[in-house]
Amino acid sequence: MANPINVVVTGAAGQIAYSLLYQLASGSVFGSEQSINLRLLDIAPMMGVLKGVIMELEDLALPIVKDILPTDDPNLAFKDADAVFLVGAMPRKQGMERKDLLAANIKIFKVQGEALDKYARKDVKVLVVGNPANTNALICSRYAPSIPKQNFTAMTRLDQNRAKAALATKIGVGVEKVQNVIIWGNHSSTQYPDAAHATVEVNGVTQPVSKIVNDDKWLSEDFVETIQKRGAAVIAARTMSSAMSAAKAAADHMRDWWFGTKPNEVVSMGVVSDGSYGIPKDIIFSFPVTIKNKQYAIVQGLDINSFARSKLDITAKELEEERTEASSVLQ
Ligand code: NAX
């Protein structure tokens, strides 16, 4: 078994972490031959709950986890970190405006960025799950200038998985037959789930999803809206936000970042914009990417029609506004 890598999970006493930790411990993210040290960060009042989570991790009796550190100190948690899941965030409370939520959270991500800058490995891979994920990732990277901006990503994989599943259901095939649906922009209700470049294998032949669905109105309206509002629909039904599916998506995102994407496979990740597709630079925008040697590349040259253009511009504008709000809070 390879020497242990240091894997940090923040919000470790919360509901997403509860599912994510099992996937880490069972080897489904970094592989069954890669041992890990878990660094579990949460806030001081949650240390008792975290103790219980650690008891359960021990009781899994799995060989991969070598050492577990529970802490409320980011400086300890991020020491020599190789891979980091920033899940912990302040939840939205009743009556709280989106702006207040953003203000509370970017302060957390500023502190964590500073700690990463000082203590983590310079090639650390940071995945931000806590909302507002894209702007939190931007702020975190801004306060960790010694770590390349490309090492900070935000999660839109849950949206991608939701979109893939919705298309498979519509077409009546298994999810594994649907590939390359794209999530553009913010992990919010302005995101643009785009099936224009997606393919589906039917009777052994790979074809465009748009041809098989053969219903442009459904693809540009119902499908887009269903995915944009899926998180809210889960909350309405479960009275709690997506956790099992969010944890699985975080595992998918990090596994692909670590090991690379398969040939002809495209995945969506919130990454720092380099201006591709006319998106403003210096926002964390979800783009289609391929990954090799732990480096992602934004897929270039996709056709963007006028409908898609307007959707991309709406979600980019929201991210620019979030950036402005974040900067004013941190001044
Ligand atoms: P929970 O409220 O169950 O857990 C959050 C945990 O974070 C708590 O234990 C809390 O004490 C901890 N925490 C708060 N401040 C912290 C800090 N400064 N340092 C370390 N830990 C801290 O939430 P959960 O359901 O696990 O969701 C976590 C985050 O994921 C939320 O922000 C949520 O909005 C976000 N989500 C993001 C998704 C995405 O696709 N990007 C989808 C799922 C989810 O909604």
Image (spheres, rainbow, N blue to C red):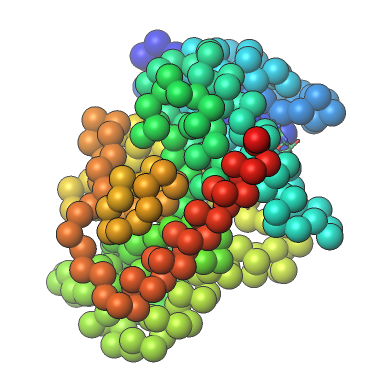
Q: Is residue 70 visible?
A: yes
Rendered residue at 50%/54% (across/down): 320
Q: Quadrant of residue 104?
A: top right
Left or right of 297 on screen, residue 27: right
Left or right of 266 on screen, residue 325: right
As drawn, 98 above or below 149: below
| Near-viewer residue (94 or 282) | 282
| Near-viewer residue (23 or 152) | 152
| Near-viewer residue (56 or 294) | 294
As drawn, 244 above or below 107: below
Q: Quadrant of residue 74?
A: top right
The C terminus: image quadrant: top right
| x then y, percent, for residue 290 | 25, 46
Left or right of 283 on screen, residue 95: right
As drawn, 184 above or below 74: below
| x then y, percent, for residue 238 | 72, 63
| x then y, percent, for residue 49 | 80, 30
Rendered residue at 35%/61% (across/down): 182
Q: Is residue 130 visible?
A: no
As drawn, 71 above or below 180: above
| x then y, percent, for residue 218 | 41, 85
